[in-house]
Amino acid sequence: MSLQEGNDLIPDEEMAEAAQTGHFGLFSRAFLLPGKNTVVKQGTGDLLIEAQTMCYVRRNTSIPVPKVYELRGSDNDAQLFMEHISGSRLSDVWPALSADDQAAVVDQLRGHLAELAAMTSRFAGAIDVSPVRDSFFAFAPNSVCTSEQEFNTTLLKAWYLNTAEWSEDEPQFPTLWQTLNDTMRGNRFVMTYNNLDPRNILVRGSQVVALLDWSQAGFLPEYWEYCRPWMRSWEKSTVVSLVDNIKHPYIK
């Protein structure tokens, strides 16, 4: 799949109408086109990686992922056209679900994560062998990592940059790096959804019908899917409740 530069983007006035009638959330850049069964997501050329990931997951798993129709635009201004799947956000209905329905949702999500975890790689990064798009690494020198030790170094630098000013002369770095490598080792790089939030999960009753927003997906250490949501500050109680119940296939 490639960007279709010959096709026109949806005009601003039509996108403005879509934003009023079919906006999918405060942080979403995806809109339901009026009178159509199509969602368009606005962004940059990075949407190409998201589209490739969605196609890869649809092709190789039974995970419900919206079908990708087309990708238009350029590296600076792009639009991803995809299937609209009707359903309720799990964040809106989770408290009202019965215990049996919650258990059914958890079982389905655990199965979907197991399918993802079965797809492995020799590197940590996006599907096109570029650095993974995870906001945790936004201010770190992120790169494609070919070993867990290399990933641990990137992880520690990102942690420093997210909490304090990074310095190569930081005296605690060697000790922390050694501790990290002594404990975080032997993990495979597996396909990771990396956006496990109830707002991104669509359900009809107790049936999971779609996992949305694959913008941060990629190959990451197998613990990442479980640990990453704990760093999210929004809707903390619902996220923690869901993730702690799902856990992850690699956690025995």
Image (spheres, helix red, strand yellow):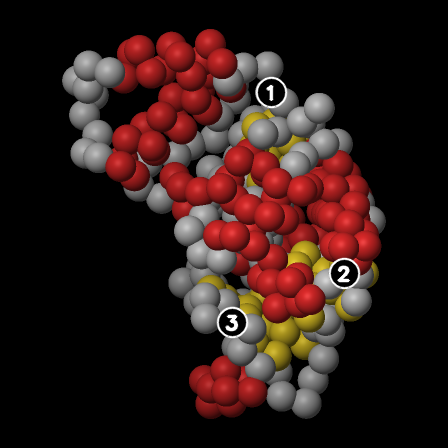
Question: Label 3, on which residue?
Answer: 25
**Residue beneath the point at 69% across and 70% down:** 88
**Residue beneath the point at 67% across and 42% down:** 245
Instruction: From the top left corner, tell me how far across and down residue 39 is, in percent.
Output: 63, 74
Q: Mark 3 or mark 1, which is nearer the start of the sequence?
A: 3
> In the drawing, what numbered circle is on residue 79?
none
> In the drawing, what numbered circle is on residue 187?
1
Q: Is residue 121 visible?
A: no
Contact, CB < 8 Å: mark 1 with mark 3? no
Q: Which kind of residue does numbered mark 1 sit on?
A: Asn
Image-quadrant location for residue 98? bottom right
Residue 107 horizontal side relative to residue 53, left or right: right
Q: Mark 2 or mark 1, which is nearer the start of the sequence?
A: 2
Q: Nearer the viewer, residue 146 or 229?
A: 229
Question: Label 2, on which residue?
Answer: 98
Instruction: From the top left corner, tell me how far across and down residue 128 is, in percent.
Output: 57, 41
Vertically, is 189 above or below 22?
A: above
Contact, CB < 8 Å: mark 3 with mark 2? no
